[in-house]
Amino acid sequence: MSNLIQYRRDIDGLRALAVVPVILFHAGYDWIAGGFVGVDVFFVISGYLISSILIREMDAGGFTFARFYERRVRRIVPALLSVLVATLVAGYFVLLPEEYVGLGKAAAAALGFVPNIYYWSTSSTYFGIDVAVLPLLHTWSLGIEEQFYIFFPLLLLALRRLKTGWLLPGAFIALFALSLWANLRLTGEEPRLSFYLLPTRAWELLAGVLLSLGIVKPVRERRLANLLALAGLGLIVLPMLLLDEKSEFPGVNALYPALGAAVLIYSNAQARTWVGTLLETKVLVYIGTISYSLYLWHWPVAVYTQMLWDSPYNKPFIVALSLVLAAFSYRFIESRYRRRVSVPGRRSARLAELGAGAGVVAVMVLALGVFQGLPARLPQRVQAVIENPANATAHDNCVAFSKQEGDRETWRCQLGAKGQAPRFVVWGDSHAGALAHAFDLAAKELDIAGENIWSGGCRPVLGVFRQGKRRCLEFNRQVAQYIAAHPTIRQVYLVGYWRVPVSGEGYDNSNFMILDAQSGAESRRENERVFLRGLQRTLQAMQGREVFLVQDVPEIGSRFGKSVSSLLARQIWTGAEIPAGHYFDDSTDRFEARFRDLLTQLPAPPVYIRIRPQLCPQKKCPLASGDRFIYSDGDHLSRYGASLLEPVFLPYLAQGLAANDRGALGRR
């Protein structure tokens, strides 16, 4: 690259400033909870350097697409292939079959330069509950850059050939503004799309492009350059320290580090600043030099380390091993292939080596798909644990409740005795579906019938919806009509993932703010008011019936991965028996007190059924009992876990049965 544009040591130092916080964040250091913004710094650097290289070549008349893409292949592919092979091999010893199949698909996506599209389409989220088992999640950012490299040279060449002075910078300014607008507009409503896809990320690379075009006059006065450099450094470092996984992102929060990176590149272009001198120190320059390999290796190291060991030494181990692997990878893989070979035979041989490496990855991926993750690797006991139906939520005797388009998870399930009219309804979201087994057991004990009507993501609050998402509004309206049309239903149990609508936050960093016809300006307090109004509408619609609101299950969160049973099965597989200490400390949950306080603001609060005392003796909520798992994931009980709650609901159902019998006697 040095023969194409003037080498700048400060940009390698800036790479170090970008990659080190990413590594520390993924290793688990809480003090740098916003370290993920380092990727945004990388995007600006990439846009600046690629544009500078292309403009220099086009000005000199030496640009060809073949040479450009060959250089990109030599820069990106060798280290990527080595990481893909190593990650796939390591997965044989660590990943369960379903996870291993997923890794194969992710490797295929990375090989095809579309990992960001793969993770967007599979509903995975950078801050979600499944990241703990995705060793190639970090390749999403490579997908963004690789797709940019495909389209940008074509556009740049076409605009330059028009030979209109203002058109080229004007076009890129317009594209920058459009992409930034899409990012800001969609982050709240479609956070996965905004995070993973090129159209909503291109503005960060285009910020670097605009710098390379020289549309801003260079700063030559050293004092001003120093002030700008310090401001740029602050715009990068402060978000790293102040943001966390719950911060809205990318959105406006991505603007700060991207702007900071652009300001640093700009301020150090003409004048030697204090910050530039710091960035040019040998340690930072070296880390910046190996930053690509360091980024590639660190996330598989972090995922596999955290899967296998729970130790206070995990964090420094992840950082140290990532640095060692990166140094080795840079010295023996990156450097070897980045040097252009002039001898045609040797050049062909190296391209053949890369083709063979890609073939190895393709064969491994194909084998994982054909043999379904190679389940024979696992001991019989581990296979039995994974396949045990008691460890998963089950839905029996169910039919589709609604025929609305898009309602893939809208169910009406029979509970208790067969052949009887329903006496009660369990109404809610997927948490209602997970608790249905407890009601089913209690109803069978009493020889009565009921129904479970649920739809994923739809809390039982009437007249409430999310911006652009009205499916639940219609679902809840239909449930209320259904209950009103069945006079035998005397009890209604409301079950939901209450934390989400009350707080307006989802586990995947999504905006779950809710609205109704009376909504004011969006805020946390207004969100609570919307929830209370919706719950009050539900209670009014159920007048004449007993209404119970069921306390939500303790949310154990994402640190165990998407599947609790997978976590514990892996521990059995690797030789560590299930520790007695696997529990959730319910005493640390502050939401419960706030939620109960909100309920007291209702004119006539429903009966509140507490389930946590049954699940969490002494405020400790175990995740498993022997080989039987109480949870199926971070916030849903398993079938076995639900069965533990039968004694909780039995007296309420019996109370309703006695009331019905008294009413029948009075009507005789």
Image (tube, grey):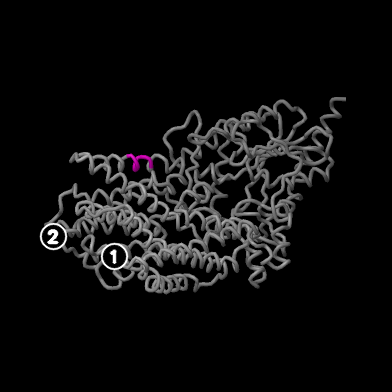
Asked which quadrant contains residue 457, the reply is top right
- Position of residue 662 measured from the top left corner of the image (x, y, whole percent): 83, 32
Task: Specify the amino acid type for callout 1.
Answer: Asp
Tell me how far mark 1 sits from mark 2, CA to CA.
Answer: 21 Å
Residue interval drawn in magenta: 178-182
Q: Is residue 193 left or right of residue 413?
A: left
Determine which residue is flagged by label 2: 222
Q: Amino acid at mark 2?
A: Arg
Q: Position of residue 604 (x, y in %)?
A: 62, 34
Q: Residues within 10 Å of mark 2 (few under 14, many from 20)?
A: some
Where does label 1 land, which residue?
12
Q: For the point 62% across and 32% down, which residue is it?
A: 476
Q: Residue at x 75, y 32 (%)?
A: 489
- For the point 41% across and 56% down, the residue is 142
Q: Is residue 159 above or below residue 379?
A: above
**How many neighbours does mark 1 have within 10 angstroms: few (below 14), some (14-19), or many (20 or more)?**
many
Nearer to us in this view, 65 or 427: 65
Secondary element under disc 1, as helix, strand or loop, is helix
List the single residue furthest toward the right.
668
587 magenta-colored: no
In the visual, does 473 lie left or right of 629? Answer: left
